Image (spheres, grey):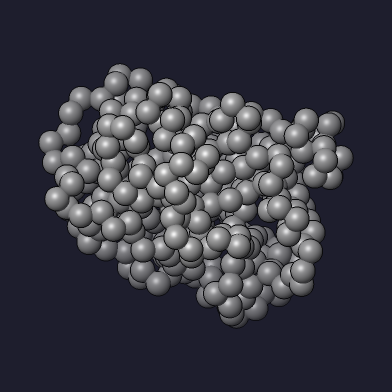
């Protein structure tokens, strides 16, 4: 099927991004995972201070009317980045997906001061109150060392089925073939749906999706989780019983969070079980910065750009 000129430009940009990633030093983007007692899953994506996000396009194809791009995210040394960036995504079987920007001072009492909604009816409003259940749970998972550091570069499961939803607004099912290549995309939206581009990447064992429309900046984010195809019947009602575990990784000690976010000037030794992953990030921060060939092209493949949190250097 012939591709439009915009898709061709998208592919060309992808190749340049991939080349830039190969030429420069890079490290897998840090991901922390946790789960509340009620079953809500917490996914943290981090970009340390003095690092920037780079994205490589691994595959692209047309499926069910969607231009689908499978990507991988990395972090690279960047002296321009003066603040860390942290995203939190939550997924439960009642209201589905939400996403937030983490902000505030990293302290011993709390790992993150608060979170600002980036989607839904609260998008762009004030940060959640410190007493909000999401703020309390996210910080408890961190301070009580219940978060896991995802170190493995996962791939979509062969013949895998993934599902996610956003309240009563949207449901999406994505399927892969025996070679882990995307095979089917189905979106059920309550309102008019014109998005025809799907960019996705792994976040642990789940998949972080961004739906966009060619020629428009409008986008919808969503995390789809793996489900048991023998239990899942395509409905939201079956999701709770069909969800497969995605909270897998190495135990993460909260004392290493400032190191992971690049907020310390003299790095201390980290726990042996996570030393390797954090050492790679520390070493990259000390290497000379190499600019991407074209930051605008990276933007085509990455999630929506958000300004880094207002974190003053005096907290370092």
Residue sitting nearer the eye, 309 or 227: 309
Residue sitting nearer the eye, 240 or 183: 240
Identify the residue shown where x is 64% and y is 66%: 197
Instruction: Give the left or right position of residue 58, taking residue 151 as reference.
Output: right
Q: Does 252 sit above or below residue 218?
A: above
Quadrant containing the C terminus is top left
Instruction: Give the left or right position of residue 215, taking residue 235 as reference.
Output: left
Residue 275 picture location, percent across and down: 30, 26
Residue 142 picture location, percent across and down: 40, 31
Q: Quadrant of residue 192?
A: bottom right
Residue sitting nearer the eye, 121 or 20: 121
Residue 106 picture location, percent across and down: 28, 41
Q: Is residue 44 visible?
A: no
Q: Quadrant of residue 190?
A: bottom right
Identify the residue shown where x is 32% and y is 49%: 104
Instruction: Give the left or right position of residue 210, taking residue 229 as reference.
Output: left
Quadrant containing the N terminus is bottom right
């Amino acid at each position: 099927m012939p591709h439009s000129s915009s898709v061709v430009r998208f592919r060309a940009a992808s190749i340049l991004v991939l080349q830039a990633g190969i030429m420069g030093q890079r490290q897998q983007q840090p991901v922390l995972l946790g789960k509340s007692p009620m079953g809500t899953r917490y996914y943290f994506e981090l970009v340390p201070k003095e690092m920037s996000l780079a994205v490589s396009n691994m595959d692209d194809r047309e499926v069910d009317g969607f231009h689908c791009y499978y990507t991988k995210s990395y972090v690279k040394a960047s002296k321009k980045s003066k603040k860390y960036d942290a995203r939190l995504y939550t997924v439960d079987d009642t209201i589905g997906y939400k996403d937030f920007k983490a902000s505030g001072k990293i302290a011993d009492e709390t790992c993150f001061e608060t979170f600002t909604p980036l989607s839904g009816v609260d998008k762009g409003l004030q940060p959640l109150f410190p007493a909000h259940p999401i703020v309390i749970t996210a910080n408890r998972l961190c301070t009580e060392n219940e978060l896991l550091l995802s170190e493995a570069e996962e791939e979509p499961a062969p013949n895998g089925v993934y599902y996610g939803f956003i309240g009563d607004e949207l449901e999406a099912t994505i399927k892969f073939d025996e070679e882990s290549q995307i095979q089917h995309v189905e979106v059920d939206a309550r309102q008019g749906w014109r998005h025809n581009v799907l960019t996705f990447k792994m976040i642990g064992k789940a998949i972080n999706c961004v739906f966009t429309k060619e020629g428009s900046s409008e986008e919808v984010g969503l995390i789809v989780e793996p489900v048991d195809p023998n239990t899942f019947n395509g409905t939201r009602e079956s999701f709770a019983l069909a969800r497969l575990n995605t909270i897998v990784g190495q135990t993460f000690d909260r004392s290493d969070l400032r190191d992971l976010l690049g907020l310390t000037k003299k790095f201390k030794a980290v726990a042996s079980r996570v030393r390797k992953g954090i050492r790679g990030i520390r070493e990259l921060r000390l290497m000379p910065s190499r600019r991407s060939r074209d930051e605008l092209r990276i933007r085509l493949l990455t999630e929506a750009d958000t300004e880094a949190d207002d974190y003053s250097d005096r907290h370092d």
